Image: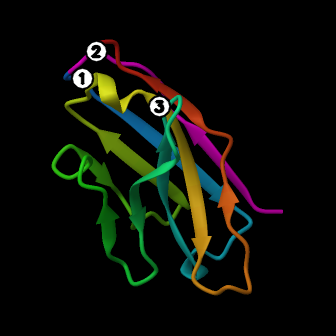
Amino acid sequence: QAQLAESGGGLARPGGSLRLTCTISGLLLGRYNVGWYRQAPGNQRELVARCLADGTVNYSDFAKGRFTLSCDNPKKTVPLEMNNLRAEDTAVYYCNADPVSSLLRTYWGQGTQVTVPS
């Protein structure tokens, strides 16, 4: 049974940093694009950053230059380093594994709250 477990959320001051980690089990990572999405109250879930199966990293515009996603992790973890946090980064952050093949399903973690007061 595949599992995605997030950790590292919490409260950060504006301009501060947080590190989120997703630990993945039960999946062959070469068959999935893995990464992070977020959802703020009243908003749709949106991509933060993801590791593509070809080894490249895809960042959303708001994450470029502030967030760093590490993709080469033999322990099947997907750490997201978030720097220079802003109030608008407040959201629930979800780990995601999206299959390369349509024959497989998508997996989500349970989410971890990140709060940056204004």
Residue 111, numbered label = none
In what element is the residue under mark 1?
A: loop
Estimate the x, y position of residue 13 in percent, counting from the top left.
28, 15
Q: What range of the chain is rendered magenta?
A: 1-14
Q: Which residue is mark 3?
A: 91
Q: Amino acid at mark 1?
A: Gly
Quadrant of residue 24 within the rendered picture: bottom right
Indicate which disc, 2 or 3, sits on the residue closer to the N terminus. 2
Residue 7 belongs to the span the image colors magenta:
yes
Query: Is 102 above or below relative to 82?
Result: below
Q: Is residue 12 left or right of residue 108?
A: left
Category of crowding for the residue at label 3, using alpha-carbon neighbours closer than 10 angstroms: few (below 14), some (14–19), many (at least 20)? many
The quadrant of the picture occupied by the C terminus is top left
SS label for mark 2: loop
**Is residue 31 found inside the magenta-colored segment of the image?**
no
- Label 1: how many residues lie within 10 Å, few (<14), some (14-19) or many (20+)? few
Q: Which residue shows up at 74% across the image and 86% down it?
A: 103
Structural distance between the alpha carbons of marks 1 and 3? 15 Å
Q: Does the CB distance between marks 2 and 1 fall below 8 Å?
A: yes
> In the depicted view, which residue is nearer to us: 30 or 107?
107
The spot of residue 19 in percent (x, y) is 38, 36
- Three-letter code for the amino acid on which mark 3 is drawn: Ala
Q: Which residue is mark 1?
A: 16
The residue beneath circle 2 is: 13
Side of 38 relative to 66 (left or right): right
Q: Residue flagged by tag 2: what amino acid is it?
A: Arg
Marks 2/1: CA distance?
Answer: 5 Å
